[in-house]
Image (cartoon, grey):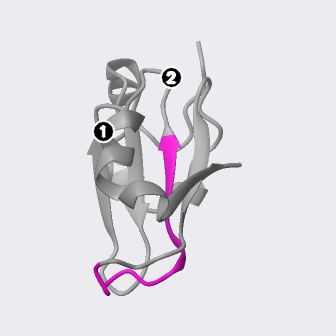
């Protein structure tokens, strides 16, 4: 069995992460099969999030993607796939999803 740091076994088996335990992604240990990334925004089309590293995230083995937005109004978003996340937040190349 894979050890999941700071998340419930039930959420891990379901392929999702408990929102209350994932606010600080850095506190999580490595989840088998997951890939960590950050969103580097080159152009801020909305004038809200700014440029540079604006979010960090994890792509789970299931294909689901969890993004933690940084800044004054941090939030978490769970996407069904990386394709969905990029289609909304990629801004036609204005934001890069950079894997660690």
Mark 1, Cα crowd under 10 Å, few <14 / some 14-19 / many 20+, is few
Element carrying mark 1: helix
Image x and y of residue 67, in percent = 40, 53
Task: Please determine whether, in this image, residue 30 is positioned above or below residue 50.
Answer: above
Read off the residue under disc 2: 61
Instruction: Indicate left or right for 98 with 69 as reference.
Output: right
Image quarter where the N terminus lies is: top right
Image x and y of residue 8, in percent = 39, 34
Q: Which residues are magenta?
A: 46-58
| Mark identifier at residue 42 | none
Element carrying mark 2: loop
Point 42% across, 25% down: residue: 63
Instruction: Indicate left or right for 36 with 57 as reference.
Output: right
Inspect the magenta stretch and tell me whether residue 73 lies in it: no
Work out how far the residue at label 1 is from the one at label 2, CA to CA, in angstroms: 16 Å
Task: Please determine whether, in this image, residue 82 is positioned above or below residue 61.
Answer: below
Task: Please determine whether, in this image, residue 31 is positioned above or below residue 23.
Answer: above
Point 44% across, 40% down: residue: 7
Q: Count up the numbered dots.
A: 2
Res. 35 image quadrant: top right
Point 51% across, 44% down: residue: 58
Q: In front: mark 1 or mark 2?
A: 1
Image x and y of residue 66, in percent = 39, 46
Counting residues from the start of the chain, the first of labels 1 and 2 encountered is 2
Read off the residue under disc 1: 84
Instruction: Indicate left or right for 63 with 78 as reference.
Output: right
Task: Please determine whether, in this image, residue 20 is positioned above or below residue 6.
Answer: below
Which residue is most to the right? 100
């Amino acid at each position: 069995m894979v050890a999941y740091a700071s998340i419930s076994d039930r959420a891990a088996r379901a392929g999702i992460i408990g929102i209350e335990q994932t606010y600080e992604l850095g506190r999580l240990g490595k989840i088998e099969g997951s890939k960590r990334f950050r969103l580097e925004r080159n152009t801020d089309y909305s004038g809200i999030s700014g440029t540079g590293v604006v979010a960090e995230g994890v792509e789970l083995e299931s294909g689901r993607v969890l993004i933690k937005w940084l800044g004054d109004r941090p939030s978490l978003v769970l996407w069904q796939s990386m394709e969905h996340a990029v289609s909304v937040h990629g801004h036609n190349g204005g934001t890069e999803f950079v894997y660690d």
